[in-house]
Image: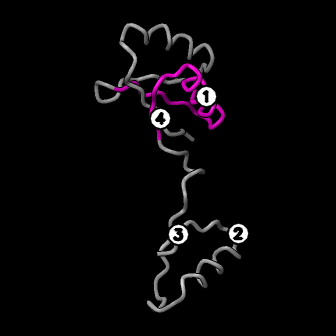
């Protein structure tokens, strides 16, 4: 399963060859490609490599952006058929009893 890519664009082009060599030494299965002509797209295979890459970029103060891993994203659920007057706290409590963390009931 592929993880979410990390995108970085703030380093000058002349610094990327050295950094990409260092990163591929630390993470051998790192895939580096150019995305939309302006971002370097860094992709790894496992969540462990993803966390390691994210940590390395953060330590070296290299700005990047990414989306959360699927396992870290909140689950959004739509429940239909309840009357509009149903108390939201009842819904929140019922879902909490199923061992889900409820962020919001709209």
Residues at marks 1 and 4, CA–CA distance in whole angstroms: 14 Å
Residue at image position (38%, 22%) is 10
Q: Nearer the viewer, residue 93 or 69?
A: 93
Q: Is residue 16 left or right of residue 70?
A: left
Q: Which residue is mark 1?
A: 55
Q: Which residue is mark 3?
A: 104
Residues at marks 3 and 1, CA–CA distance in whole angstroms: 30 Å
Query: Within the magenta stretch, is there residue 47?
Result: yes
Q: Which residue is mark 4?
A: 5
Disc 3 and disc 4 in contact, CB within 8 angstroms = no
Q: Earlier in the sequence, mark 3 or mark 4?
A: 4
Residues at marks 2 and 3, CA–CA distance in whole angstroms: 15 Å
Please tell me in which quadrant of the rendered image residue 95 appears. Answer: bottom right
Q: Residues within 10 Å of mark 3 (few under 14, many from 20)?
A: few
Residues at marks 4 and 2, CA–CA distance in whole angstroms: 30 Å
Which mark lies nearer to you, 1 or 4?
Answer: 1
Q: Earlier in the sequence, mark 1 or mark 4?
A: 4
Counting from the top left corner in percent of width and height, residue 57 is at 54, 24
Disc 3 and disc 1 in contact, CB within 8 angstroms = no
Specify start and end residues of the magenta stretch as a single range: 39-66
Colour scheme: one colour
Q: Nearer the viewer, residue 57 or 25?
A: 57
- In the structure shown, which secondary structural element does the residue marked by tag 4 occupy? loop
Residues at marks 3 and 4, CA–CA distance in whole angstroms: 28 Å
Residue at image position (47%, 43%) is 67
Q: How many discs appear?
A: 4
- In the structure shown, which secondary structural element does the residue marked by tag 2 occupy? loop
Q: Which residue is mark 2?
A: 99
- In the structure shown, which secondary structural element does the residue marked by tag 3 occupy? loop
Q: Earlier in the sequence, mark 2 or mark 3?
A: 2
Q: Residues within 10 Å of mark 2 (few under 14, many from 20)?
A: few
């Amino acid at each position: 399963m592929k993880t979410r890519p990390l995108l970085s664009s703030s380093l000058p082009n002349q610094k990327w060859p050295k950094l990409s060599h260092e990163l591929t030494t630390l993470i051998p299965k790192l895939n580096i490609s150019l995305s939309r002509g302006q971002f370097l797209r860094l992709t790894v295979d496992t969540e462990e490599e993803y966390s390691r890459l994210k940590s390395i970029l953060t330590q070296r103060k290299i700005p990047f952006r990414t989306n959360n891993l699927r396992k870290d994203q909140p689950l959004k659920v739509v429940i239909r058929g309840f009357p509009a007057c149903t108390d939201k706290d009842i819904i929140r409590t019922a879902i909490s009893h199923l061992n889900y963390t409820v962020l919001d009931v709209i």
